[in-house]
Image: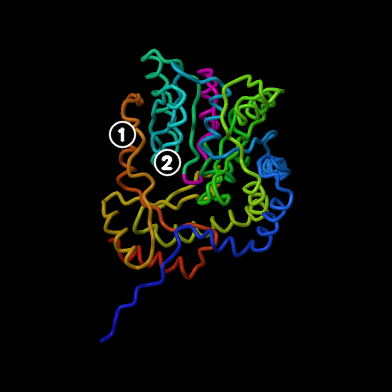
Amino acid sequence: MQQHMPSQAISFIDVAEQRRRLGKRIDDAIARVLTHCQFINGPEVARLEADLAAFSGAKHVVACASGTDALLMVLLAKKVGPGDAVICPTFTFCATGEVVALLGATPVFVDVDETTFNIDIASLKNGIAVAKRQGLKPRAIIPVDLFGQSADHDAIAAVAAAENLFVLDDAAQGFGATYKGRRLGTFGLATATSFFPAKPLGCYGDGGAIFTDDAELADTLRSVRVHGQGSDRYDNVRLGLTGRIDTVQAAVLIEKLKIFPDEIAARNAVARRYNEGLGQVAIVPRVASDCTSVWAQYTIRLPNGGREALASTLKAQGIPTVVYYPRSLHQQTAYRSFPVAAGGLAVSEKLSTEVISLPMHPYLDELTQGRIIEAVRAALPN
C-alpha cells in the first residue's frame, strides 16, 4: 500500500539560512566581544550606532534593548504622562499603545488605510478631536510603518504641525524602507525600531534603536537609557530605565547590516513573485508609488472568508501561516477602555478578519515559493 509522505516543512522566517550565509563573520564578531569582555556598552555599540546613522541618514542613533524600549524612552524623554493623549493606529502590535499606557498617558486609537494598512489621516484628525473633547492634551502621534511599508509621513507631519504635536515613528517593521526617496529614520522628531530576530534586520535576542536629528533629545535618551543618570552615575537627573543593548547583539547587527541592502532587494523579489502568482485569488498587498517596503510580512486578504481553512490546508502541506492581527488593539482586553476615533474603526476590524501572512524572507527560493503559491491557488476559489 502506498503511503502519503508529508511535504518538507517550509520556514516562515529562515534565520538559519542567513546564519549559514554569514558563518564565520558572526563567529568572529562574537569572539571579539568574548575577548575584550566589555559586554555592556562595549566598542561595538558606538560602531553600530555610527553604521546605522550612515545607513539611515539620521544625525543621531541611540541603540537600546528593544523596540518597545525605543518607543518608551522617547516618551519618557518628552515627559509624556497622565492627562496626555497619544494618537496610535489600532491595527498594530500592542507595544505601540502599551508604552503610552505604561506612562499613565492615554492612547487614542484610530483607523488605518485599507490598502497600505497604515494610519488613516481622516481618522487621525478625528482621534485628535476626540482626545480634546475628553479633556486630554494631545501630545504626539505614533504612526506605524506596518508590515514593512512606510506610512504617509508628509500628511502626518502636516497634521502634527497644525496641532503642535511631535511624531514618533514606529518603524519596528519598516526599518530599511523608504518614503519619497528617504530611508525611514529621518521623519518626525524620532524613529524607533526593533531588532527582534524575526525583523528584517534582526539580532540574536532583543535589541532596538532610536533615530533622531535632535541633538538635545539624543543626549536625553542616552541618560534615560541608563536609569536617567547625569554626569555622576549616582546622581540620576530624571526617571529612566535599563535600556541598553548588549555588546554581543551590537556585534551581530554590525555584520548583518552589511548584507541588509542585498536582503531588502531579495525580499522585494519574493514579494513580486507572490503578487504575480496570487493576484487572481486574493487581495495582495500594494506599495504606494512613492514608497518602498522591506516586507517584514507578506500579508494577503481574503474578503470572502476561508482564512482558517486556508491555514489548515497549508499546514498539512508543511507551509506555515500567521495572522497579524486577529484583534486590533481596541478589541483586546487590556485596551478596550481607551478612546477611539469618532466614526469607529471599521477598516481595522475588517482587516482583522481577513488578513493572513505567508512565509517571507530573503532566502525563499523560487522553487519553494512556487510550491507555496501553487498550494494557495489550489486552496482558494478563482
Residue shown at the point (57%, 43%) measured from the top left: 207
Q: Are marks 1 and 2 in contact (CB under 8 Å)?
A: no
Q: Amino acid at mark 1?
A: Thr
Q: Amino acid at mark 2?
A: Phe
Q: Position of residue 41 (x, y in %)?
A: 68, 39
Find the magenta span and give its range. 147-169
Q: Position of residue 380 (x, y in %)?
A: 30, 61
Along the polypeptide, which appears first: circle 1 or circle 2? 2
Q: Is residue 227 magenta?
A: no
Q: Quadrant of the N terminus?
A: bottom left
What colour scheme was applied to this rendering of the protein?
A: rainbow
- Quarter of the image where one finds residue 179: top right
Residue shown at the point (40%, 36%) measured from the top left: 112
Residue shown at the point (71%, 42%) measured from the top left: 42
Give the label on residue 117, or none: 2
Res 382 visible: no
Q: Element at badge 1?
A: helix
Q: Element at badge 2?
A: loop
Q: Is residue 67 above or below residue 222?
A: below
Q: Quadrant of the C terminus?
A: bottom left
Residue shown at the point (69%, 42%) measured from the top left: 45
The residue carrying mark 1 is 333
Q: Is residue 291 above or below residue 272?
A: above
- Quarter of the image where one finds residue 125: top left
Depth order, front residue of 376/331: 331
Give the label on residue 18, or none: none
Res 142 visible: yes
- Quarter of the image where one finds residue 350: top left
